[in-house]
Image (spheres, rainbow, N blue to C red):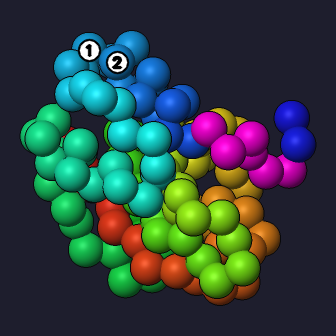
Amino acid sequence: MRGFGQGKCAKHVRRALQAAGAKVPQPYEGSGKDYGRVLLQLGFHQITVEKPETFSFMKGDIMVMQPHAGGGPHGHVAGFDGKKWISDHVQTDFWAGPGYRKKRPSYAVYRY
């Protein structure tokens, strides 16, 4: 796999949620940045994460990140498997790639 994804994070996170038994409402959300409302509909709640580098995430946590300046318009969504953040790729850390890591756009984390 490449160092960063294929631009299909929302699709892959949706499929993971469905594989876990979630009834994701249709029409399916196409942008990662908009997945917060879907997660709330599924019973997730937003948690406060001030420093993702030191926060103790739990398996099943999902992050929704807004676009960064100079990046694409869709933002990002990824789920935590207990060890790594995964979307359409396995991330090296909380930040979805070099642009996100450098620009650090706003984000929200959801827990079921």
**Residue corresponding to mark 1:** 21
- Give the image location of residue 87, x and y in percent: 58, 40
Segment tinted magenta in the rendering: 3-8
Q: Residue at x 29, y 29 (%)?
A: 27
Q: Amino acid at mark 1?
A: Gly
**Left or right position of 3 against 29:** right
Tag 1–tag 2 contact (CB < 8 Å): yes
Q: To which quarter of the image does residue 96 belong?
A: bottom right
**Vertical comparison of 9 with 54: above or below:** above
Q: Residue at x 67, y 45 (%)?
A: 7
Dot 1, crowdedness within 10 Å: few (<14), some or many (≥20)? few
**Vertical comparison of 28 with 6: above or below:** above
Nearest the eye: 40 or 73: 73
Q: Residue at x 21, y 20 (%)?
A: 23
Q: To which quarter of the image does residue 103 belong?
A: bottom right
**Which quadrant does the C terminus fall into?**
top left
Nearest the eye: 48 or 104: 104
From this viewpoint, which residue is outermost toward the right?
Answer: 2
Q: Any magenta on residue 4?
A: yes
**Left or right position of 40 against 105:** left
Dot 2, crowdedness within 10 Å: few (<14), some or many (≥20)? few
**On residue 18, which mark appears?**
2
Q: Any magenta on residue 92?
A: no
**Left or right position of 24 against 70:** left
Q: To which quarter of the image does residue 86 belong?
A: top right
- Give the image location of residue 90, x and y in percent: 69, 41
